[in-house]
Structures are given as C-alpha cells and as structure tokens.
Amino acid sequence: MTAGTGSPDGTGGYYPQQAYYAPGWTADPDRPPPPRRARRLVLWSVAAVVLLALVATAVVALRMRAETSPLGDVSEATTVHSRRLDVGHCVARLPEDGDVGRVDVVPCAEPHVAEVVGIHRFRSDAWPGRQRVDAEAAAACEMDSRQADAGFRAVVWTPSEASWGQDDRAGLCLAWLPDGEARGSFAAGDEVTTG
C-alpha cells in the first residue's frame, strides 16, 4: 500500500459529493410557484378588507342620513341632531353658545323655551366664511310683533364650516323666550302662552 492512497478506489480519500443547503439558505431558481391555497388566502384577505371598507362607508352614510333627515311631527320628547329641525319644532332648552349638536325637542303643547320659526337657505356652494354666514342668516331672521310682544328674542343657528362641507345650507331662526317657558306654536297659529 502506498502512502496517501487510503481509499480502495484509488482516489486518495476524496469522495465527490453535492453540497447540501438547508431550506431557506438560498433562493432556488427551480422552485415552483406558491401553491394555489396561498394565492387564494391573499385574494380572500384583500376581498375581506374591501368588504369591511364598504360596510364602514355604508354605516357612516346611513348614520349621516339619519342625523340629517327631516324630523317630521313630534309626538313625544326626543333628542335629535339640530340639522333635523324644521319650522314648528319646539326646543325644550337651548344648548350653550357654540356648536350646536343634539337638542331636546318636545311637542309644542309641552313647556319649551324656543321654537323654530324660520329657515334661511344659503345659495352659495363655496364656504363664505363664518361672519358672512352669521350676518346673512341674522338679516333673514325677523321676529314678528306677536313674538316680540310676548317677550321672545331671535336666536340664529347657522351651519359650521364642517357641516357646510356636508351640504348643510340651512340657517335656523328660533323665537327664544329668555325668561320662563312657553306652550303652543307660532308656526301652527296657536295661542302661545308664557309663564
């Protein structure tokens, strides 16, 4: 036996082998595409996100519609968004000065402090600014002598810039009784009593 020839086949101890790489060590160009199940999972995930977005949009739209649709006749005390008010609706109490959101509305035969007696419709599409909106609505809101003689004062509620962007173009004119409460409706032609 000769030194350095330790293998029976005479290769000198060298056995040619193919290198082994554990999965993930290198990208295999011959690797097949991901299975259909993985692609389906991605498609279902995207579809679920789109569906959730559509449902959320629908909920917001329905809520907005519910908060802005006309209130109609009031047969019992209820709390509604001020954008639902119309001429002849009576407000149990006025909110603090500032943004007006939800208000308590009652049948006008029940005690209340204010009644919507007029609506001014703005014609501008672009937001004209707070001062112009307030001035235009105040000029359109006139108290008649019957309301003034009974001690009522004019209060004007106008759209905010945010609600203007949601197509709110109505300014409300309210006959407000600063002292005491009223019963009856000016809009309905009732004999309004105060006390």
Image: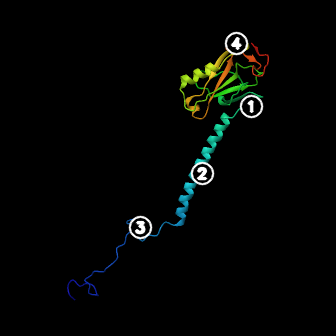
Screen quadrant of the N terminus: bottom left
- The front one of 121 and 49 is 121
- Could you tell me the amino acid type at mark 1? Gly
Q: Earlier in the sequence, mark 3 or mark 1?
A: 3
Mark 2–mark 4 distance (CA, rounded to whole Å): 56 Å
Instruction: Rate crowding at label 3 as few (under 14), some (14 to 19) or many (20 or more) other CA atoms within 10 Å.
Output: few
Tell me which corner region of the image, top left, top right, bottom left or bottom right, holds residue 27.
bottom left
- The front one of 71 and 37 is 71
Answer left or right for 30 relative to 67.
left
Give the image location of residue 23, x and y in percent: 41, 67
Q: Nearer the viewer, mark 3 or mark 1?
A: 1
- Could you tell me the amino acid type at mark 2? Leu
| Figure check: 73 above or below 12 | above
SS of the residue at dot 1? loop
Label 2 with label 4: CB-CB less than 8 Å: no
SS of the residue at dot 2? helix
Give the image location of residue 90, x and y in percent: 72, 23
Screen quadrant of the C terminus: top right
Q: Earlier in the sequence, mark 3 or mark 2?
A: 3
Q: Earlier in the sequence, mark 2 or mark 4?
A: 2
Q: Which residue is mark 1?
A: 72
Q: Nearer the viewer, mark 1 or mark 4?
A: 4
- Could you tell me the amino acid type at mark 4? Ala
Q: Residue at x 67, y 25 (%)?
A: 119
